[in-house]
């Protein structure tokens, strides 16, 4: 068979391309489309032979789409219109315009693609944009299956619940297809088991365990289980942590199907000092930090504000393994600021590095990243190179 011709929309730094590459499918990206200049630099560095179109999707004509003669579409449309903590503008949000344009173009193509893969945030499944997508797929004759999945489903210790849709044209249904239902597990189990995970009527109930992982709460365990049982439900222990929250995280850390964070971390060295949390931020946000250790089997979702904003942007790492989190926070609110900082500093808290975050997102070690040094000079470097051997663009 000839390789599948793949069109990658909203290509970003190339996550979909990398996934396609690692799937070992016989395929080639005939065009990647994105307007973000920084993302495009990373993409070009890692996939230099792929045609990269730095233009808006609405700027691509029907004729241009037809000339590509693609067999598959990979896309991850802007998620801001659908995030649960955002304005949820849905199809009224200008950032949805390009996606609606795709849905308008799709039925008018000379040759429909055989396959479609779409990714977005949780919240997309209840949007008008998703309804428009399903109507378009039905009009064009696609069969499809929807999922709500987190990296924890495949053993990666990071909670990032996302919506996925896979569709194929005029073929037999998927062997794992559950029409009208959103599956919350990968289709590597019996269909009978998968059907138990439907989300059509009770999205919150079916996804409760996954959704709870996304709460930005500290995952470390303080008092013993016996002492916790004597406290009333909802009572706070240390660090604004409730009994129920700590027990949930304790259960997650005992889930051997998920790898420990240490498998995704870089070796500690002197350069790590740049990632330590500044004293001012430590004093202000200590009680809100989601603190994890290398032996934890979870971390919260990292956002684009990570490293610039502290609250709710992702977990931080406790590198002082011999210090108990509870002891650092015990009666800390009663201490003078200088003593408070001294106790908190014993934890040696730092941000995850760009490479570690890339690891938790499934990017291989050879994937080049962009970073800025202390002089704000921008580099694209392979991870195995040291600071003296930077291969720069």
Image (tube, rainbow, N blue to C red):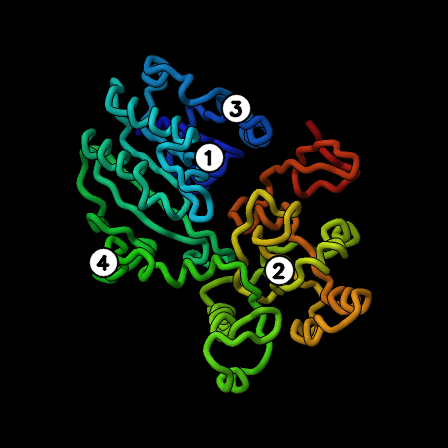
Instruction: Identify the mark nearer the N-term, 3 or 2.
Output: 3
Q: How far apart in space, not on screen, are marks 1 and 2 (Cα)?
A: 33 Å
The spot of residue 271 in percent (x, y) is 77, 49
Question: Label 4 belongs to which residue?
Answer: 195
Q: Looking at the image, is 143 positioned above or below residue 231?
A: above
Q: Residues within 10 Å of mark 3 (few under 14, many from 20)?
A: few
Check whether the beta carbons of the residues at disc 3 and disc 4 lie within 8 A of each other.
Answer: no
Q: Nearer the viewer, residue 65 or 59?
A: 59
Given this view, does label 1 or label 2 mark the residue nearer the observer?
A: 2
Label of residue 49 in the image: 3
Instruction: Identify the mark nearer the N-term, 2 or 4.
Output: 4
Given this view, does label 3 or label 2 mark the residue nearer the observer?
A: 2
Label of residue 289 in the image: 2
Instruction: Identify the mark nearer the N-term, 1 or 2.
Output: 1
Q: State which quarter of the image contains the C terminus.
A: top right
Q: What residue do we see at 31% from left, 45% from top?
A: 126
Q: What residue do we see at 73% from left, 62% from top?
A: 348
Dot 3: element = loop
Given this view, does label 3 or label 1 mark the residue nearer the observer?
A: 1
Q: Nearer the viewer, residue 18 or 351?
A: 351
Q: State which quarter of the image contains the N terminus.
A: top left
Q: Nearer the viewer, residue 279 or 236?
A: 236
Check whether the beta carbons of the residues at disc 2 and disc 4 lie within 8 A of each other.
Answer: no
Dot 2: element = loop
Q: How far apart in space, not on screen, are marks 3 and 1 (Cα)?
A: 12 Å
Label of residue 217 in the image: none
- Residue lying farthest to the right in this orientation: 338
Instruction: Identify the mark nearer the N-term, 3 or 4.
Output: 3
The spot of residue 272 in percent (x, y) is 74, 52
Question: Label 1 belongs to which residue?
Answer: 17
Q: Say whether residue 322 is visible.
A: no
Q: Residues within 10 Å of mark 1 (few under 14, many from 20)?
A: many
């Amino acid at each position: 068979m000839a390789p599948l011709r793949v069109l990658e929309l909203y290509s970003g730094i190339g996550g979909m391309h990398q996934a396609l590459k690692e799937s070992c499918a016989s395929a080639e990206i005939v065009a990647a489309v994105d307007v973000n200049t920084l993302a495009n630099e990373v993409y070009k560095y890692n996939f230099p032979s792929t045609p990269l179109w730095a233009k808006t999707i609405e700027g691509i004509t029907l004729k241009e789409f037809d000339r590509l003669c693609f067999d598959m579409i990979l896309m991850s449309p802007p998620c801001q219109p659908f995030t649960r903590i955002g304005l949820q503008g849905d199809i009224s949000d200008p950032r949805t315009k390009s996606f609606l344009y795709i849905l308008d173009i799709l039925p008018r193509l000379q040759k429909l693609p055989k396959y479609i893969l779409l990714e977005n945030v949780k919240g997309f499944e209840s949007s008008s944009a998703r309804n428009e997508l399903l109507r378009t797929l039905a009009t064009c004759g696609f069969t499809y299956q929807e999922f709500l999945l987190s990296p924890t489903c495949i053993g990666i210790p990071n909670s990032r619940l996302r919506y996925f849709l896979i569709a194929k044209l005029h073929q037999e249904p998927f062997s794992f297809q559950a029409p009208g239902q959103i599956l919350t597990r990968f289709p590597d189990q019996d269909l009978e088991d998968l059907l138990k995970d439907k989300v059509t009527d009770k999205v919150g109930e079916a996804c409760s365990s996954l959704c709870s992982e996304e709460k930005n709460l500290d995952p470390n365990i303080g008092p013993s289980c016996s002492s916790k049982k004597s406290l009333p439900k909802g009572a706070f222990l240390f660090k604004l942590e409730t009994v129920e929250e700590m027990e949930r995280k304790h259960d997650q850390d005992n889930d051997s199907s998920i790898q420990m964070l240490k498998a995704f971390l870089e070796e500690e060295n002197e350069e790590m000092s740049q990632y330590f949390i500044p004293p001012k931020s430590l004093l202000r946000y200590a009680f809100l930090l989601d603190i994890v250790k290398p032996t934890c089997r979870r971390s919260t979702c990292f956002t684009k504000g990570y490293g610039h904003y502290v609250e709710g942007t992702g977990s931080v790492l406790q590198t002082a393994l011999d210090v108990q989190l509870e002891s650092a926070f015990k009666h800390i609110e009663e201490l003078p600021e200088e003593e408070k900082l001294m106790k908190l500093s014993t934890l040696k808290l730092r941000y995850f590095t760009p490479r570690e975050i890339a690891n938790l997102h499934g990017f291989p070690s050879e994937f080049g990243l962009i970073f800025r040094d202390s002089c704000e000079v921008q580099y694209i470097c392979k991870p195995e190179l040291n600071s003296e051997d930077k291969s720069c663009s």
